[in-house]
Amino acid sequence: MISGSISIRNRTGEEKHRIERPKGNLSPVWGVCFNPVREDEADVWGDVLAVVDWSRTLSFYNLAGKQVGKERHLGFDPVCVNFFSHGDYMIISGSNKEAVLYTKEGVLVGIVAEQESWVWCCKPRPDSNQVAVGCQDGTIAYYELGFSTVHSLYKERYAYRENMSDVIIQHLITEEKVRIKCRDLVKKLAVYKHRLAVQLPERIVVYELTKGDSNDMHYKVKEKINQKVECTLLVVCTNHIVLCQEKVLQCLSFQGVKEREWIMEAAIRYIKVTGGPQGKEGLLVGLKNGQIVKLFVDNPFPLPVLKIASAVRCLDLSATRKNLAVVDDTGICLVYDINTKELLYQEPNANSVAWNSQNEDMLCYSGAGFLNIKARDFPSHQQKLQGFVVGFCGSKIFCLHMNRMSTIEVPQSAPMYQYLEKKMFSGAYKVACLGVTEGDWHALAMAALEELDLQVSRESFIRIRDVPYLQLIQNFEERKKKGESDTVFLADTLAYQGKFAEAAKLYKRAGNESRAMTMYTDLRMFDQAQEFLGSDDVQDKKMLIKKKADWARNINEPKAAAEMYLSAGETLKAIEIVGENGWVDMLMDISRRADKADRDALMLCASYLKQHKQYAYAVEVYRRMGDIPSLLQLYVEARQWEEAFIVANQHPDYKEDVYVPYANWLAENDRFVEAQKAFHKAGREDEALRVLEQLTHNAVNEKRFSDAGYYYWLLSMQCLDIARDGNNQNEKMINKFWDLQRKAEIYYAYHNVHRYIEEPFTSFLPEALFNMARYLIHQMFSDTLVGVSKVAILYALAKQSRNLGAYKLARHAYDRLQNLRVSQRFQESIDLGAVTIRSKPFSDVEELLPLCYRCSTTNPLLNNQGNCCINCRQPFVHSFVSFEILPLVEFVLEDGITDEEALRLLESDSSILTEQPSWLEESGGKYQSLRIDSNIENDLDADPFTAQLMSFEEGGLEFSPVVASRSVLQSMKHSDVIISKWQSPLHYRYFRNLMPDVQITKCNSCNQLFHSDDYELQVLQKGYCPFCRYNPEESQVTDN
Ligand SMILES: [Zn+2]
Ligand SMILES: [Zn+2]
C-alpha cells in the first residue's frame, strides 16, 4: 500500500498480519510476491514474501510478518517483482528502465532487459526461462534467458555453479557433493588438484582442501584477490591464477600480483592444465586459428605444439602424454602423436574428447547423440549419449548434460574384443583390467591360451579363478621347458574345451597318437580310442581293453568288465569280479579253462567258491591243482569231517591237518571224549593230554569236583591207551594210570561231601555221607589233593558219625579238626561239637562197624592201614554210589592160568549148575535175579574158594590175596564171579560175590562196582554211569 504497509489475509479476505515498512509513507510498497519454492527447500524458503518499495529496497518477510534474510538496496525505484524458475530467481523492474535478475536471496545476477522508459511490468512465462516486460512508452518486449554453465573439472573433482551464486563440488568417484555459498554471482570457476578458484564480480576467492587427500571434500578459503577482473577463462594452478581474455593470458599470484603475460596470435578457445611441479605447471592452450601451444607458468615463452586446420574446441592429453586428441570446430576429433606430430587417426561427429586416465591407448569422445569409445586405431564402439564427455577414468565416463554431471559405467568388452581380434593379448588384458565381465575374461583367457600366450591367459584365469585351466597352464609351462611341441599344447587345450575330435586330429598331426588314445580312453569313448591304436601295438591294445574293463567295473557293469578282463588276459581281476558277485558257473568256467599251472588264478577261484559255500566246486578245483592241504583245509572249514578223513587216509602225511582241527572242533563243542580220540588219531597225544589236563585243572579250580573226577578218569584211560600202544614207558604209564584212577575216585566221592558242606540240603542219606567221608579219610591218610579239603571231610564225618552213633569216630574227627586250620564259618560249630561229643559214650554203635567178607573180622571204623581189613588186609570194595562195602572178595589166578582159560573154566562150571535145580529164578518186573536156596548154601560149605579165603597169615604185615587154582575156578559159579575185563596190558580182575543174593552191577566202561539198585537209579536219573558217564543203553545200540 502507498502507506508502506502490507496486509496478509487468508482466503476469506480476513487480515492475519500486517507489515509496516520502517519509513511509513516514505516507502510505498510497489510490489509483493510469494516465493513459489520447490518442496525440497520449503523449510527455508517456503512462504517467503519478497517486498519492493520506493525506499529502493528489497526485503523479505515470513507469514508471521517477521522480516527474514538480508534487506537489499536496489538503487532504483522498483515497481514490479516476480519470482521465476520455481523460485530460484526473481526479476525486478522499475525506474532504472531495466528488468534485473536476482537470486531468490536478492543477489544481483544480471540485467535481463534495457528499455527506453520505466519498465512497469515484468512477468516470467511459467515453466520457462522467458520473460515479458511492459514499459512506460508502450513497448512490450519478450526475452529469453540463457543460463551459461560455469564449471571446471580436474580428474575426479567437478565443480559447477548452481543458482548463480553457489558452487557445488562433486567427487565423481565417491559421489559426494559439497556446496559453497558465495552470496554473490559466480562468474568463473577453476579446479586443480586441491585448489578451487571462484571469480565473483568484485574479487577472486581461492579455496584449498583442508586435508588434501584424494577423497577429502572440506574446502576453506585460502586467499582473496580483491580485484575486479574480466576474463573468458579462469585457470588455477598450485600457486597461480591464469586469466584468459581473448588473446591474452595473464598469470597472477594469489596476492593479485601479475607475474607474467602471454599474448597469443589468435583468440584462446581452450586451456588445459597438464600438470607439472608446483609453481611450474604446464598449460595446453588451443586457439581459434587452430594453433595449439604449450605454456609453463614460470616461462615467458609459449611453445607451439601443432596447428590444425580449424579452430580448437576441445583438447586432451593422454595418460602418459604421448598422444594428443583435439576436437576442432567442424566436429572432427584428431589424434596426434605429440612427439612426431603425426596424425594417428581422426573421427567425425565429436564435440568433446577425453583420454582414459588409466589406459594410454583409449579415449572417448561424444557428439551427435553418441558416445564413442576408441582404443588405438580400432573402430570406435558407440553407445547413445546426450551431452559432453569431460572425463574418462577406468571404466567410468564423466558426462555433462544439461548442467548435470553423470557418471556412466561403460563395459570395456568391445575394445577388449578389438584387441583380441588382432591377437594383441596384453593390450586386451590392459583394457580388460578397466572392467569387463567374467565372460569377457574367460574369452580373453581362452583366446590367449589358444595362441599360447600363457602369461596373459594365466592372469586372466586368475581373475575368474578358473583353477582347472590354471593347472593346465602350469602343466604347459613345465612341459614347455622340456621342449614339447606347441601343437600338443593346442590339442590339450582343445581337449580341455571338449573339442575332442579336433584335439585328436592335432595329436595325430603332432605324431602323438597315444595321447589321443589316452584321451578317448579317459572319456570312455573306447571305439574312438581304438582308431588311434597302433596296429601292431599289442601292449596298447591290452591296456585299452583293461581300461575299458576298469570303467565297466566302475559303472557297475561287472559282467561286462569281467568278460573284458578275461579277453585282456587279466584273469585275476576277472575272477575277483566274478567271485565278488558270486557267479559260480562263471567261476567254474574260468577255473576249468585256466591252465593247471596258473595256481594264483585257480587258488582265487577256489577261495571264492569256498566263500560262496560251493564246496563241491572248490573241491574240484583243488583236486585239479592237486593241492591236498587246501583241499583238507576246505573240508575242515566246511566241517565235512568224513570226506576229510577219507582224504587224510589217502595222504597220511596230512593226517594232522585234519585231526587237530577236528579235535579242536570237538573240544569247542564239549565233545572231549571224541576230541581225545581225534587227537590220538592225529598222533597228538601230548595235545590230547594237555587239553584234558587243562580241563581238569579248571574243573578243580572251579570246584566242579564231579567233572574233575570225570576228567581224571579220562586222563587215566588215556594213560592206559598210551601204555597199550607199547612204548617203553609202559610201567610208568600204568603207575600213572592207577594214580589217576585213585584221584578220579577221590574227586568223585569228594564232590558229594563238598556239596553237603556248601549247600544246606543234600539228597544223600546220613549213612551215605558217613560212608563217603570214611572212604575219603581212609584213601587220603597219607597225602593231600588240590581242592580237596580235609576239614570238609572231617567235618562231614564228625557230624554224620555223631548222628549215627559213631561217637568214638566223631571224637577222633573233632580231635583231628582241632589241629587243622578251619575257616571261620565252621569254627564255632566244630568247637561246640568237640565239647558236646564228650558227653557221648566213648564207643561206636555196633551195627556201623564193617565186617570183613574174607576173614569175617569185625573191623573198627578207623583203620590206619587204609580201606582194608585190619586182620587179613583184604581191600574193601565199595559200591560207588552209597559207598557201602560190597560183599566181594578179589582173587587172583594161580600162576600159569591165562584170563582166557580162567573164563573158560568159569563158564564150564555153569553146565554143572544147570543140572542141579538148586536155584530159583524169580521174575518180577524188569529185573531178573538169581536166588540160591539156603539149603543149597549150606551144602556149599565145601566150596574150595571158601577154604582159600583163610589163606592169610594172621597179623601178618604183607597182604596175600586169595589165589584161585583151576579146580577152584571150576568149582565157582560163573554168576558169583564178577570180572573186570581190563584191556591189555592190564590183567582181568576177579571178584567173588560171597552174598550172591546181593545184586551187584559192574559198569562195562569204568569197571566200577555198584549195588545194582543204586546203579540203575543213577542211570535212570542221569542217563549214564555216575562215575565214567558211559551210557549203557547207547552203547547197546552201537554194539548192535
Ligand atoms: Zn579180613
Ligand atoms: Zn562206569
Image: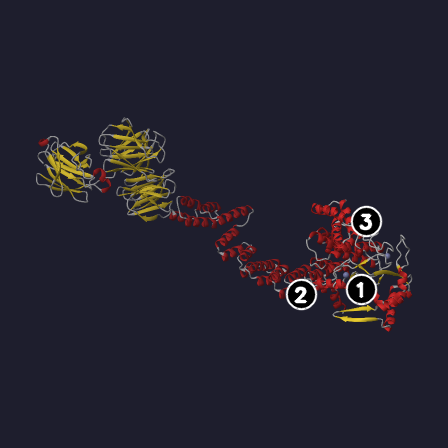
User: Which one is earlier in the sequence, the residue at label 2 or at label 1?
Assistant: 2
Q: Residue 63 placed where, x, y %?
A: 17, 38
The residue under label 3 is: 782
Residue 355 visible somewhere in the drawing: no
Total label count? 3
The image quadrant in which ligand 1 is located: bottom right
The residue under label 2 is: 617
* Mark in front: 2 vs 3: 3
Is the CB–ligand 1 distance for label 1 below 8 Å?
no
Q: Residue 455 placed where, x, y %?
A: 48, 45
Q: Nearer the viewer, residue 409 or 259?
A: 409
The residue under label 1 is: 998
Q: Is residue 475 above or below residue 578?
A: above
Question: What whole-number distance in Å separates the C-alpha atoms at marks 2 and 3?
Answer: 64 Å
User: Which one is earlier in the sequence, the residue at label 3 or at label 1?
Assistant: 3
Q: Is residue 658 above or below residue 220?
A: below
Circle 3/circle 1 CB separation < 8 Å: no
At label 2, the amino acid type is Tyr
Question: What whole-number distance in Å separates the C-alpha atoms at marks 3 and 1?
Answer: 33 Å
Q: Nearer the viewer, residue 173 or 375?
A: 173
